[in-house]
Image (cartoon, rainbow, N blue to C red):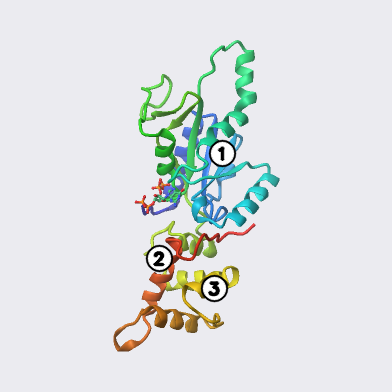
Amino acid sequence: MTIQWFPGHMAKAKREVTEKLKLIDIVFELVDARIPISSRNPLIDEIVANKPRIMLLNKADMADPDVTKQWIDFFAAQQIEALPIDSQSGTGVKQIVAVAKERLRPKFEKMLAKGIKRPRAMRALIVGIPNVGKSTLINRLAGKHIAKTGDTPGVTKAQQWIKVGKELELLDTPGILWPKFEDEEVGLKLATTGAIKDTILNLQDVAVYALRFLAIYYPDRLKERYVLSHIPEDIVQLFDEIGKKRGCLAVGGVVDYDKVAELVLRDIRTEKLGRLSFDRP
Ligand code: G4P
């Protein structure tokens, strides 16, 4: 999905999420476990303000598990509860309801104390930047039989609730927010992981960034994947070596750098270099 984020669109997105927040008890902030900072909306704290929030590190199946552990500790130190999940397979998804219940316990206990015998289900909204996995998670939580309740009185009529068991109701349309793309490195990380379309940034620039990152953090995997005895310091030389090894050649036998860039990025996104994390605590 490509969304052009003009200031007007950002203001509209913020307004829409703010409207939805009025209907819910808790926010599930979805981020990409490989880039949990770069895939956050820059205004999320301001937008969500005082609503209880759980951070979901989605696509944890693709992230470096050691780094994910570090992130969970990092966020815990900031009083942010973060759960690693894989919405595609469902790993960790069951825990979301349990954690939400715990977070909202005080609110629901207050309801009980006020004499409300059967408190309603918790109401949640999923928010996140495009391609982070919001729809996948909604479908995963909804399971095979999506039971939609009818219009709730006093609620904007377009909104539908998806029942997740008895205890949770999810707004059927997620809150879509924009990433922090004014930061060049954030843009490169979003592109490396495939969160933004390859046409937005120059593919070779993205591959240069990714290869430099891999050379620092995952040198052995880089060497193994492209059968390199050592990693050349010079990035053009590295492109040349990978290109020759993998047959990314143009007419005349010269290395085609676009092909190398495509190959490297495809390899990263399809986990040919294993599970990688590009943001580090
Ligand atoms: P969005 O609503 O936030 O825009 O994201 P969406 O659910 O469409 O997910 C974007 C892509 O990320 C999809 O892949 C989806 O399958 C993949 N995805 C979502 N959650 C996970 C996860 O936990 N782990 C992994 N490995 N992938 C996940 P796609 O290539 O766009 O489509 P497809 O492969 O499903 O056909």
Residue extending furthest bottom?
252
Foreground of the two, 278 or 243: 243
- 121 or 203, nearer to the observer: 121
Q: Amino acid at mark 3?
A: Arg
Label count reads 3
Q: Quadrant of residue 200?
A: bottom left
Location of residue 119 with respect to 242 vertically, above or below = above
Extreme-right residue of the structure: 77
x and y percent of residue 90 in the render? 46, 42
Whole-angstrom CA distance, mark 2 to mark 1, is 35 Å
Q: Earlier in the sequence, mark 2 or mark 3?
A: 3
Residue 212 tag number: 3
- Depicted 129 relative to depicted 28: above or below: below
Residue 171 position within the rendered picture, expressed as x and y whole percent measured from the top left: 43, 32
Proximity of marks 2 and 3: CB atoms separated by less than 8 Å: no
Which is closer to the viewer, label 2 or label 3?
Answer: 2
Q: Could you tell which of marks 2 and 1 lies nearer the N-terminus?
A: 1
Q: Element under label 2? A: helix
Residue highlighted by disc 1: 48
Numbered label attached to residue 266: 2
Q: Quadrant of residue 230?
A: bottom right
- Tell me which amino acid carries mark 1: Val
Residue 117 percent across, percent down from the top left = 56, 11
CA gap, disc 3 and disc 1: 35 Å
